[in-house]
Image: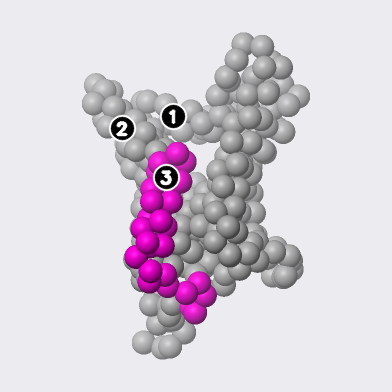
Amino acid sequence: MHSPVRSWLAPTRPAFPGAVTEPGERRAIIVELCIVFTITLGMSGLRSLLSLVDSLLKPIPLAQQQAQINVPQAVSSLIDMTKQLLSAAQLIAWGALGLYLLWRAGIKLAQVGLDRRSPGRDTLLTLVLAAIIGIPGLGLYFLSYHLGFSLAVQPSTLGSTWWRPITLTLSAFGNAFAEEVLVIGYLLTRLRQLGVRENASVFGAAVLRGSYHLYQGFGGFVGNFVMGLIFGRLWQKTNRLWPLVAAHTLFDVVSFVGYALLKGRVSWLP
């Protein structure tokens, strides 16, 4: 096996951040991880698992059930818009919490890949990732749906309002920012401090990412697990987080806004 291939399959742990050896500090990191993911994506994963179990217990096939993502939250259009914006703000705040805790630990944003050091390279990487993850991911979903392993996912059931594209775009960014910051930048950094091996870290983070998509069915778990492996390893090798956030935002915008525009106009959308 050639060295470049080996370096991707079994990467060497970087010198930064250094492993924490003091028992009290290690316990503090573990407690912090438990708290952060209990109130954010870890809890979402548990709820998503229960949602899937509930769907499996129903007397109708998964493909005949629906999983809705962006749904109306109020009768009043103004209140609904405000609540949609608050939902996006909450997701952004989850990501900000992870960044704040890293900053308090002496880890700068640039050290997890949130800087403007290489905008051209980041833009190219964003477009490549959006293509190699978004297009096959969409194909995997439709295959899983038609095989009966996934629910009919409806990215948006919002009414046709002037603010719908705005809130859906902000929702896409909120989801991307929360997931990539917490599951990649924050979690993988903390696991490095605990001395967890790179492969084990990226595998665990990918399982977590897949878990909170279980409400969509088995296809949602598999597709996001694979995405987690790719995104996690890419971050471990390049230390660039912005392209992951941007690519994730891009294909969520296409999914959310595209679905809202095409629903009822094409026959192949569930």
Q: Which mark is residue 67?
A: 1
Q: Position of residue 82 (x, y in %)?
A: 68, 23
Bin the neighbour count of mark 3 within 10 Å (Cα to Cα): few under 14, some 14-19, many 20 and up.
few
Label whose residue precedes the other's in the sequence (3 or 1): 3
Percent position of residue 128, x then y: 61, 63
- Quickly name the residue at label 3: 35
The answer to whether one can see residue 27 in this image is yes
The Cα atoms of the two marked residues, 3 and 2, are separated by 20 Å
The residue located at (54%, 33%) in the rendering is 155
Mark 1: which amino acid? Ala
Q: Is residue 150 visible?
A: no
Q: Is residue 259 left or right of residue 62?
A: right
Please tell me whether mark 2 sits on a helix, a strand or a loop. helix
Taking the image as shown, residue 224 lies to the left or right of residue 259, namely left
Question: At label 3, which amino acid type do we have?
Answer: Ile
Label 2, label 1: how many angstroms apart (C-alpha)? 13 Å
The numbered dot on residue 50 is 2
Observer-nearest of 29 and 149: 29
- Amino acid type for the residue under numbered disc 2: Leu
Quarter assignment of residue 26: bottom left
Judge the density around disc 2: few (<14), some (14-19), many (≥20) Cα neighbours within 10 Å.
Answer: some
The range drawn in magenta is 14-42
Indicate the quadrant where residue 254 lies: top right
